[in-house]
Image (cartoon, helix red, strand yellow):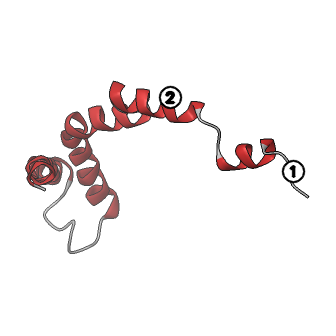
Amino acid sequence: MAAPLAGVAPMYALCFLGYGVGKKVFCDDDAFEKSKLVQIGLAGAVSSFFTTPILGPGARSHHAGGSPEQRSVRARHSRQPSAAQRSREAPCRA
């Protein structure tokens, strides 16, 4: 439980830091009073540039199939016939 919390806290810190930087760059003083959604959205988009270095490698490993150990376990399990395959190949009993 401590490992996910240790990874989430820096990610959110960078997210809010990026949003603050984006607000300084894109938002006027009255952006939140007049709901200038384009400016607020651009500020939110800047926060994604700050969190991508943390989240990107993790997402890439998920799409690539995980760690080598996880891929080998899936490969072993994929060679075993499924329940449907076993039932089709089972001899019929009358």
The part of the image, by quadrant, that contains residue 55 is top left
Report the residue marked by disc 1: 92
Instruction: Give percent across and percent down for residue 86.
Output: 71, 44
Q: Of all residues shown, which one is farthest toward the front?
A: 94
If you read the primary sequence from the N terminus, does the residue marked by circle 1 or circle 2 appear first?
2
Instruction: Give percent across and percent down for residue 46.
Output: 23, 45
In terms of secondary structure, where does tag 2 sit?
A: helix
Callout 1 crowding tier (Cα within 10 Å): few <14, some 14–19, many ≥20: few
- Residue at position x 38%, y 37% in the image: 62
- Residue at position x 35%, y 24% in the image: 68
- Residue at position x 79%, y 41% in the image: 89
Callout 2 crowding tier (Cα within 10 Å): few <14, some 14–19, many ≥20: few
Q: Of all residues shown, which one is farthest toward the right?
A: 94
Identify the disc placed on residue 29. Answer: none
- Residue at position x 59%, y 35% in the image: 80
Residue 49 located left or right of residue 60: left
- Nearest the viewer among 14 and 24 is 14
Identify the disc placed on residue 75. Answer: 2
> Is residue 91 positioned above or below 68 on the image?
below
Image quarter of the C terminus: bottom right
Image quarter of the N terminus: bottom left
The span from disc 1 to disc 2 (Cα, nearest Å) is 30 Å
